[in-house]
């Protein structure tokens, strides 16, 4: 009898952790289009019986892409504002809030840098501006002086806060002397410049790394099917990009032992045939790891066309900007949640990036192009005060809760007016990010195996549910 009692007691003790785990509540954070809630934590929800409501079924057995992360670009403009318009303590506080995970930080783990000037720089320049625009085939005038002023220090500070931060680098134009126009504006890369441009990229990656700024992913041209009229840009056809990857950049990086991953396209959803043309070149295909997308034209489902044709390739959304062309908070917040946070990840994105991390109260500085683009945050250039925009909250619903290394898992795509996507973090916790696009509150059940959580979302609101 004593033996049976002892065994029963031992089994009861062993079962306590399981009972505790089974009873562990789900936590939830909500942002609503009417701004009543802004990543506001709700009361915990205990699992229990729930019937008569629509069900979002989460299935961790079905597993998809592993996540790199979410974030925004540290443009020249963003870095200049952060470095010159904030005090040391303001700067540390902001970067800790954006890149850290302590005290409600967003935990951004992906960013993008420009190789040379973009439309969000203080002026136009390249990393090899030879005197008088003369050719510089030996790259004697190559210099990282400009990014070393503001961008690299900002990146190093962000890396010190979040060691998981990964970096995508992209040029808006080759140096002027490499181009058919002899200018950073418009034009194409000269055939004779292909070998030296490959060495240019290798040098950038190597020298940036020596300054504490790694390049995890590289795209060779921002928006290669567009030649802007008033800021750096360069047209680069798919067949010619393929030739550059195959015969120049791929072999150059391999010869130097550089492990940076190469991404093609870096442009809109409306031309999936562009990266497919590059992948059709067998040699180029062997060097290119994936495809980068922008959001300004086409539909997010285009990501699936390329992914189905090349399932081994990584998928990233590397640029999208909010702006004054969509001033309504609820509308633009809804679009970002549905297309970027939920849509792009459901269509395979391992990482999702907004454009400027920060701009000022006039949507500046900029050097041509968009004068109405909005940053994740707005920094008042006179006071240093921070305004957190709708982009901040949309991306926070993913970046704060979905950790680097998380795996997207299956979940019911849409129940009534609620769309969702689910992830499993490396620690085994699970996250459902959902958006209710209806005009009425949505009540539903999140089902995960034997666990059932009854919850709700206000109209036009996002929720992040963690258990």
Image (cartoon, rainbow, N blue to C red):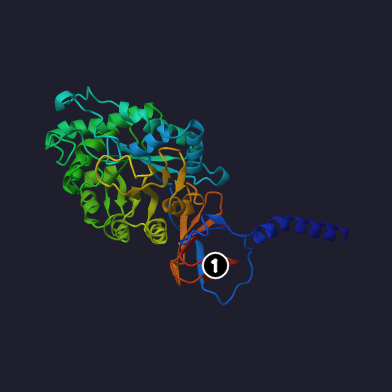
Q: For residue 134, say whether it is visible.
A: no
Seen at 25% across and 38% down, the residue is 250
Seen at 41% across and 47% down, the residue is 376
Seen at 31% across and 57% down, the residue is 303
Q: What x and y, as percent, mark residue 110?
A: 41, 43
Q: For residue 97, say whether it is visible.
A: yes
What count of labels does the image hold? 1
Q: What x and y, as percent, mark residue 21?
A: 66, 57
Between residue 445 and residue 363, name the one nearer to us.
Answer: 363
The residue at the far right in this view is: 2
Name the side, left or right, on which 167 lies relative to 88. left
Query: Which residue position holds label 1?
Result: 456
The residue at the far bottom in this view is: 52
Res 429 quadrant in image: bottom right
Q: What x and y, as percent, mark residue 141?
A: 23, 23
The residue at the far top in this view is: 140
Res 363 quadrant in image: top left
Q: Is residue 383 above or below residue 296?
A: above
Q: What x and y, as percent, mark residue 109?
A: 45, 43
Q: Quadrant of the N terminus?
A: bottom right
Between residue 440 and residue 86, name the one nearer to us.
Answer: 86
Q: Is residue 450 above or below residue 426?
A: below
Mark 1 secondary-structure assignment: strand
Q: Is residue 246 above or below residue 396?
A: above
Name the side, left or right, on which 407 lies relative to 170. right
Res 240 quadrant in image: top left
Name the side, left or right, on which 408 lies relative to 12. left
Q: Is residue 439 above or below residue 434?
A: below
Between residue 41 and residue 310, name the one nearer to us.
Answer: 41
Name the side, left or right, on which 15 lies relative to 126. right
């Amino acid at each position: 009898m004593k033996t049976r009692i002892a065994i029963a007691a031992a089994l009861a003790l062993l079962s306590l952790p399981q009972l505790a785990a089974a009873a562990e509540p789900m936590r939830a954070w909500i942002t609503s289009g009417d701004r009543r809630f802004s990543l506001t934590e709700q009361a915990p929800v205990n699992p229990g019986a729930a019937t008569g409501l629509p069900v979002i079924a989460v299935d961790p057995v079905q597993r998809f892409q592993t996540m790199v992360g979410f974030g925004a670009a540290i443009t020249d403009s963003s870095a200049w504002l952060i470095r010159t318009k904030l005090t040391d303590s303001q700067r540390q506080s902001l970067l800790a809030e954006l890149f850290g995970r302590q005290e409600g930080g967003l935990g951004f783990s992906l960013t993008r840098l420009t190789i040379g000037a973009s439309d969000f720089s203080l002026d136009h320049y390249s990393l090899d501006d030879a005197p008088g625009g003369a050719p510089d085939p030996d790259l004697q005038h190559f210099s990282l002086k400009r990014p070393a002023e503001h961008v690299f220090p900002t990146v190093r500070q962000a890396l010190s806060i979040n060691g998981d931060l990964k970096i995508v680098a992209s040029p808006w134009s080759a140096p002027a002397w490499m181009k058919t126009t002899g200018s950073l504006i418009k034009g194409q890369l000269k055939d004779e410049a292909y070998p030296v441009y490959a060495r240019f990229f290798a040098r950038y990656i190597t020298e940036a790394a020596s300054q504490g700024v790694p390049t995890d992913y590289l795209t060779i041209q921002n928006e290669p099917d567009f030649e802007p009229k008033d800021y750096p840009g360069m047209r680069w056809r798919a067949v010619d990009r393929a030739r550059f990857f195959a015969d120049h950049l791929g072999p150059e990086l391999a010869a130097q032992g550089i492990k940076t991953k190469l991404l093609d396209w870096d442009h809109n959803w409306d031309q999936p045939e562009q990266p497919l043309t590059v992948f059709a070149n067998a040699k180029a295909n062997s060097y290119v790891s994936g495809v980068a997308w922008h959001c300004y034209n086409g539909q997010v489902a285009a990501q699936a066309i390329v992914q189905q044709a090349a399932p081994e390739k990584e998928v990233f959304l590397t640029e999208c900007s909010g702006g004054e062309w969509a001033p309504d908070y609820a509308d633009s917040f809804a679009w970002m949640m549905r297309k970027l946070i939920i849509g792009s990840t459901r269509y395979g994105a391992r990482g999702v990036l907004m454009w400027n991390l920060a701009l000022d109260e006039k949507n500046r500085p900029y050097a041509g192009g968009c004068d109405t683009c909005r940053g994740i945050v707005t920094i008042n250039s006179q006071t240093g005060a921070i305004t957190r925009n709708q982009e901040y909250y949309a991306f926070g619903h993913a970046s704060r809760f979905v950790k680097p290394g998380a795996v997207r898992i299956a979940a019911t795509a849409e129940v009534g007016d609620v769309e969702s996507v689910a992830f499993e973090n490396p620690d085994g916790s699970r996250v459902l990010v959902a958006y209710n696009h209806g005009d009425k509150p949505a009540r539903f059940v999140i089902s995960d195996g034997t666990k059932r959580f009854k919850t709700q979302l206000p109209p036009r609101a996002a929720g992040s549910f963690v258990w």
